[in-house]
Image (cartoon, rainbow, N blue to C red):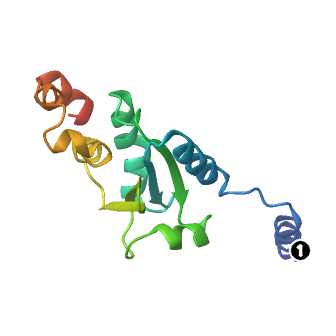
Amino acid sequence: MTSLMLAAVIQISVIAAPQQDTNEDYRRAYRRSVTTGRPLVVLIGADWCSACRTMKTSVLPRVAKIGGLDRVEFTYVDLDRQRDLASRLVHGKSIPQLVRFTKTGTGWKSAYLVGRKDAREVYYFINPGLAHGKNSNNLSTMRDPWWKSLFYRR
């Protein structure tokens, strides 16, 4: 009986507690994107998804380490905690999803990368000009052996 009463008190306190605005990070990144003109990159994931955790804690930090997030505004959206926002951003039902929004003269253009990807794929998705021949010297650098240690763990 005591545990039942404790559970009820905890539920009531959680419901009554002021909810923090879980969308604030997204709004802040969006505003920075509009101000700077940089693309907005959003990782949509969930704590229970192992591929999402890998992307968030392993792959994206490696991409950031080599400057792959320097030219974008980045944020994370949790599918469970930010359900309304995530449902507007997600394309299909699979997660993780990396979404790149680029502002054009006619509005926002979006591109999606779905599923767990390695750091090289994520880097080129976030920085599409490098994958299409621009800055080709960076492409050759990506093939150097020391880069492999940043992208792949052994």
View extreme (top): residue: 146
In the rendered image, residue 128, in percent from the top left (x then y), is placed at 25, 46
In the image: residue 97, left or right of residue 28: left
- Name the one closer to the observer, 131 or 115: 131
In the image: residue 31, left or right of residue 13: left
* Residue under the point 30% across and 56% down: 116
View extreme (front): residue: 105
* Residue under the point 17% across and 36% down: 134
Q: Is residue 42 above or below residue 90?
A: above
Residue 96 visible here: no
In the rendered image, residue 69, in percent from the top left (x then y), is placed at 40, 37
- Name the one closer to the observer, 66 or 8: 66
Q: Is residue 142 above or below residue 27?
A: above
The quarter of the rendered structure image containing the C terminus is top left
**Quarter of the figure with residue 7:** bottom right
* Residue under the point 46% across and 60% down: 45
In the image: residue 51, left or right of residue 28: left
- Give the residue at mark 1: 5
Please tell me whether mark 1 sits on a helix, a strand or a loop.
helix
**Quarter of the figure with residue 123:** top left
In the rendered image, residue 126, in percent from the top left (x then y), is placed at 32, 46
Residue 129 visible here: yes
Q: Is residue 133 above or below residue 111?
A: above
